[in-house]
Amino acid sequence: MKKKPLILVTNDDGVNAKGLQSLIEVVQPFGDIVVVAPSESRSAMSNAITVKIPLHLKQISSLNGLTKVACSGTPVDCVKLALNQVLERKPDLLVSGINHGSNSSISVVYSGTMGAAIEGCINRIPSIGFSLLDFNPNADFSVALKFAPQIVQNVLEKGLPEYTCLNVNFPQTKVENVKGMKICRQTKGMWKEEFEKRVDPHNREYYWLTGNFKNYEPEAEDTDEWALNHNYISVVPVNVDLTSYNAIQILKLWQYEGQNK
């Protein structure tokens, strides 16, 4: 008998997040599910790993093809421990999310959700990071529940190019308002951070991060930001290889061998 697909589920909002439960609901019909997720929120951890303190795992439940484990570390720690200690075999798919909040454009660099997906990708596991443009802890995930299963099915059936994972973002809108899905590129933009200076009750100064996203190409119609702003689901293929191939020929003019400077 052919084994059911084994699907590893993780996130960065924590093991009790509504988005994680929604993602479990999305993938449960496709196979056996093992969840290894942070014991509390670990947002904006990117690819961080824990190296100076011990990590702990705590099994929360295991019933009817669904095992749930809490990890004291980062999203990438969750994936590493899952592959090394929790799972009996390599998973057929890794899904991360569903994040409470956007991971479009440059946010992919900071995202713990995508950090976990990229870690899966490094380990040659087809991997998808899912996010919803709503930071509310009680966000409505109806759009994701409706459209994510088809993306999961496509990846399970067709796979992904080696060292490529998917960054999927859902617009904050009603199901009936979704215009479709677009394969996009990452928008050129950045977060313009500001640190608000405050004083705590002990008269000590501290700083609170604030800021706004700046889109450098708001009129470009092939980007994830444009798609999301027009009620499309954005799907951006993300490559683990960070080499800027366009720059290689230019920079080769700088290279030299031996003492020929």
Image (spheres, rainbow, N blue to C red):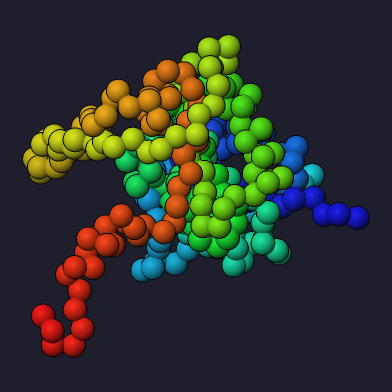
* Left or right position of 149 against 211: right
* Left or right position of 57 against 221: right
Residue 83 visible to an observer of this rendering: yes
* Position in image of residue 130 (x %, y %): 52, 37
Picture quadrant of residue 48? bottom left
* Position in image of residue 172 (x %, y %): 46, 20
Q: Which residue is at the front of the view, 82 or 214?
A: 214
Image quadrant containing the C terminus = bottom left
As drawn, which residue projects farthest toward the right?
1
Q: Residue at x 60, y 56 (%)?
A: 125
* Left or right position of 73 against 8: left
Q: Residue at x 57, y 53 (%)?
A: 161
Q: Which residue is at the front of the view, 173 or 181?
A: 181
Q: Residue at x 46, y 39 (%)?
A: 236
Picture quadrant of residue 83? bottom right
Q: Residue at x 51, y 61 (%)?
A: 122
